[in-house]
Each structure stands twice: as C-alpha cells, then as structure tokens.
Amino acid sequence: MVPRTLAASKPMPSEPTYDKVPAHIVRPPYAKSGSPPSWETQIPIVSKQEIEQMREASAIARDALQLGGSMVRPGITTAAIDAEIHRFIVKQNAYPSCLNYMGFPKSVCTSINNIIAHGIPDNRELMDGDMINIDVTVYKNGFHGDTSATFRAGTVDAAGEKLIQATTESLELAMQICGPGVPFSRIGESISSFAEPRGYSISTDLTGHGIGRNFHQNPLIYHHFNEEPGEMAEGMVFTIEPILCQGVAAGIQWPDGWTISTEDGGRSAQFEHTVVITSDGAEILTK
C-alpha cells in the first residue's frame, strides 16, 4: 500500500493502545508517531539470514490473508474481517503493519468493487456479488511481509470472474520473469502485454515497492509499460501487486485521505506477493 498523496485530510496518527497491541510485541518505528522513516536512495540487499527472518513475517501475512478470505461472504462487515485478522496477527506476537502507518486507522486495507486500493474497513455489509481485495502486511523480527488477494462474496458475475482471473494470471507471469539481471521494466511489460489485449487498464498511480526493514523502500515496481532504469539483483526483495480495471484505471482519492476509487466506477482487482531475488531466479515469500 503506497499512499498516492500525503493529503492533509488523512486521519491523525494515533499510537495503538496496549490492549489493542500488547506491550511485548515489537512495534515498527512509525507505530507511535505514524511517520515512517525516509527512504534510502540505494536498493537494500537482504542477507540470507535476514531472508529467513522475513519468511516468518511473510508466512504470518499469508495465513492472515487466508483467514480473512475465508470470512468473506454476503452480510459480513469489513470491520469484522479487520478485527479477526488483527487478533490473529497479534496472537503470533507480530504487528499489523498498516496500523497507524501515516495515520491509517485499521490493521488491513479492504477495497470493494470500484475501490482501487486503501479502503478503510467499516460497518458496511458485503453484498452478494461483491469483489473485495484484502491487503495484509505483517511486522515480525524487524521485517515486513506483504500480500493481498481479491475474494468473492457469494456469486460474482462472469465479467468479474474474468477480471479476477486475468489479474491472477498477470501477477504469475510477472513473477515468472524475475531473476538476477532482469530489468525492472520487464515486470510492467509482461503485465501490460497480457492485460491490455484483453481489454483491461492498469493502475499507474499505485506501484509495487521494495520491502524489508521498512514497509516501503526502493525499488518502485511499475505494472505498466515503462522505461524505468535498474535491474534485479540477488538479495533484493520487493512486492509485485498489479491492479487491473474494467474501465479507466485513473483514480479519485476520497476525503478520508486513503480510499481511492476508479473515476468511472468500473471494478478493479488486485493480487500481490512479496518476492526475493535468488541466485537463479526468484522465490515468493508469501506463497
């Protein structure tokens, strides 16, 4: 989740109370102030030992996402999903990375139908046919792990099913091309070459990102055709998280400072994994 703007309307940062996140749980540096550290110019290289530490955070994020997905059905609220995922993460002695990140008030993002990203969980009940993306990031052992998926509430129509399937396939294709020496721009090329001939637009406002000790860091990962410089190298860790839209991918940010919806009301879908570059390819840490 990469904020599109630091809008003044964002919620004021509020440090989680100890009844919400027990005192023994190690918190990321921004948990109290809401202000994340500035990005390093260089792309961090993660050691093999650090990758092992990232595996646990990534595995907890994966399991939390699966838990949230299992709850999706008509009639349930996104607040209930958020609360259950929060309880699960805390039970693993981990911290839900989204909580108080730049003032974000909940532990996960829940984005429904035409919401591209950063939806704030609330008391709206899901309806039959809704599509909901749940975005989970976990902080454990000093590292973050980030993943998301789009789930179906009840029966989704044929067009929605095709959108979900196309987004899943675009992520898989992008991950398959990753490895040492591969230009970052190949990710956007592989996704665009697959999605655009099928009639889908790709969000250019939101990107994948490096991840590790910081929730967000270099490199930025663009999911559309681009000419950004840089190549992958062993030990780099980043997310790939394409957002495909049925109509126009341009987004409108809501007054809450977080929620981004499509301009034309068309639906979107997103899937995401955290990937580490290895000596001979790439490994998906959140799979």
Image: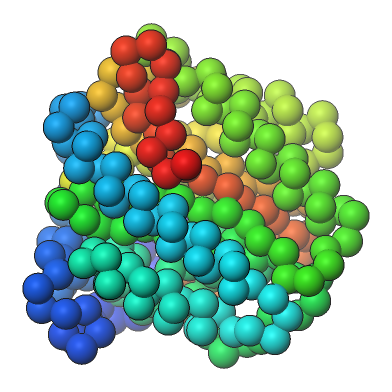
Against 214, residue 101 (above or below) is below
Q: Is residue 210 visible?
A: yes
Coloration of the structure image: rainbow
Against 233, residue 38 (above or below) is below
Query: Which of these two is toward me, 65 or 187?
Result: 65
To which quarter of the image does residue 130 belong? bottom right
Which residue does the image show at 20% across and 88% down from the upper left? 19
To which quarter of the image does residue 251 belong? bottom right
Query: Which of these two is toward me, 209 or 132?
Result: 132
Find residue 249 and report its horizontal and vertical position in percent. Answer: 68, 50
Which residue does the image show at 58% across and 42% down from the upper left? 242
On the rendered structure, is 278 left or right of 160?
left
Which residue does the image show at 59% across and 84% down from the upper left? 77
Find residue 58 and report its horizontal and vertical position in percent. Answer: 34, 48
On the rendered structure, is 223 left or right of 245?
left
On the rendered structure, is 198 left or right of 130?
right
- The quarter of the picture where the N terminus appears is bottom left
To which quarter of the image does residue 225 belong? top right
Which residue does the image show at 63% across and 57% down from the upper left? 150
| Residue situated furthest right in the rendering | 158
| Residue situated furthest left in the rendering | 24
Find residue 67 and report its horizontal and vertical position in percent. Answer: 50, 66
Q: Is residue 212 visible?
A: no
